[in-house]
Amino acid sequence: MRLHELADRYRDNASAVVVEIDSTGRRREVTHRRLHDLAVLYADRLTAAGVRPGHVVGIRAGNGIDWVLWDLAAMMTGAVLKAFADETVIGDPGEFVTRHGLALLVTDAEVPSGHPALVRPDGVPGVDVVPADAPRGEPGDLHSLVFSSGTSGLLKGLNVSRKGTEYVISRFIECFGVGADDRHVIFLPLSNYQQRLSVYCCLWIGADVVLAPYQRIFGVVRDERPTFLIAPPVFYDTALQLFHKTGGGSLGDFLGGGIRFMITGMAPIRRETLEAYWAQGVRLLEAYGMTESGMIAWNTQEEHRLGSVGKLIDPEAVTFLPDGELLVHRPAPLSTGYFDTAGAADETYRPDGTIVTGDYGTLDDDGFLTLLGRKKDVIVLDSGRKVHPAEIESLFAGVEGVVELLVVPTPRTGRLGAIVTPADPKDDALVLSIRERIDKTNQSLESHQRITSLVFSDRPLRNDPRYMTANLKLSRPLAAAYFAEAAQARRQERAAEHGR
Amino acid sequence: MGFDMTALENDLVGWVARWNEETDLVVEADTNLQGAGLLDSMALVALVAYLEDQTDTSFDFGSFNSSGGVTIRDLIKHCVG
């Protein structure tokens, strides 16, 4: 895959389409050929506005065909697209444009009008509106500027590489055998670079691509019949529950009937969810990657193992530190570094280009990678021993009657506690038996791995917005705070009982 | 198209109750679904998909104001009210 040849690939394709479905449910469809014609038109408009190679064009807008057109037009003019998340606050447009070094800002945000360098996604910019002092660089390998939560959870700005983009897409096409018969639905924001990779991929192979807001995803999947989908675990959990509660027929039919495979990543997925999809004949494949490096491992249709994130894409590019942390050092990482570290020190990129992932993992004998946890999630016990909560959780995965078990540090004793959600919180006998089973499992573990304190929750914390990060991942600090609060309440309750 | 609003409310109340069958939380037509911890944002999307199916309409998310919380009554009113 070559980005500079992308336009030549899709310009004459009159059969493949790009579909847009907006928040009201309205549907718009263009062929790849028409998309190309429009992209040329948008590129001409950029040029007329004064955008030149090396300028930075900002975009902060909801998913849609226009978003894709500005991206393709920026490529055609040699400009670099800077993609802002939907929740980015623009405030004073002039100050925003200057602060971000923009030549033009495409936005659907409600901002004070009148600034010449602003244009709505479906609008036409004025002539020669680029600020005279708009910086121009030499893009070289720089393809785009994007924001990602990165390895630390802070929103950081990343320089996305052209070569890295081409490499990741090429490997995806090779490993998943996607082609012109495929149809892909995107419902996460295009400001998330993974979604743009998917768009470029579909344009390259001549596949259909459907853009939709996440609010419409279940209807869109059913009506648009994608052949593959990439989504976070919360989508698969909800889709499964929706199917069980309201669906008829098979899970595959519920998902439109055309699914060849589905990919999940971005956060750990529950083993039961994976098993439920496979039991229904739907191939749900876990993958692992980061915007800094690109994809690192994935399960494929041919090679997969439940509970792992698959085989390493480039085994020779990954090494493990003695404590299990993964380092990636590939010739063409997806990103070449940060342009904004959100005030934090850049500890991810080493001078030699090695990327320190902050993830711990282990390879089994067949080369499948299992992630043990994040560096920032490591619990340091009072004994000085370090444990990965996800690793401890996996040791208790077989305890019957447990919907969720989250391992947290105990606030007072510096050991391990757990938040347990029973299948039926009202069933006292079940709660008692869970305690007994956890005790029994404890006996087979080393002392520092044992869960010494339990708090029961009526509902799982994962997927509960109160305990999730902005990226829909479980916030372990918030889970630990929940445990500390519940344990404190229990102590007070007991003290009151003793005082009576 | 006329809808029996009470029947529709009851239908959706039942749907949310089934979604939360492992909890003691009480569902009513004017319960703040997310505020009460009954539905996360993706589950709310699932509920609206069900509502669209039942009413054969398209819910306009663009004009729906959820800043004060979302109730079943609000959803129905916005969809078919």
Image (cartoon, coloured by chain):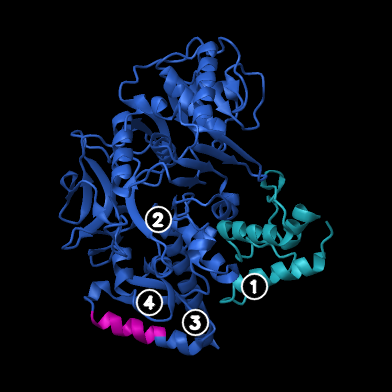
Question: Which quadrant holds residue B47?
Answer: bottom right
Label 1: state its secondary structure: helix
The residue that appears at 28% across and 41% down in the rendered structure is: A348
Residue designated by label 4: A453
Vertical position of residue B5 compared to residue A165: above or below:
below
Q: Is residue B75 above or below residue A196?
A: below
Q: Quadrant of the N terminus of chain A?
A: top left
SS of the residue at dot 4?
Answer: strand
Mark 2 element type: strand
Q: Which chain carries label 1?
A: B
Horizontal and vertical percent for residue B30?
A: 75, 64
Residue B17, disc: 1
Chain identifier, colour cyan:
B
Which circle, 3 or 1, is nearer the viewer? 1
Badge 2 sits on which subunit? Answer: A
- Whether A480 is among the magenta residues is no
Q: Are marks 3 and 2 on the same chain?
A: yes
Q: Which residue is drawn at 60% across and 56% down?
A: B45
Instruction: Confirm whether residue B38 shows in the render.
Output: yes
Tell me the magenta residue range: A434-444
Closer to us: A403 or A339: A403
In the image, taking residue A496 as reference, residue A180 lies left or right, namely left
Numbered circle sitting on residue A495? 3
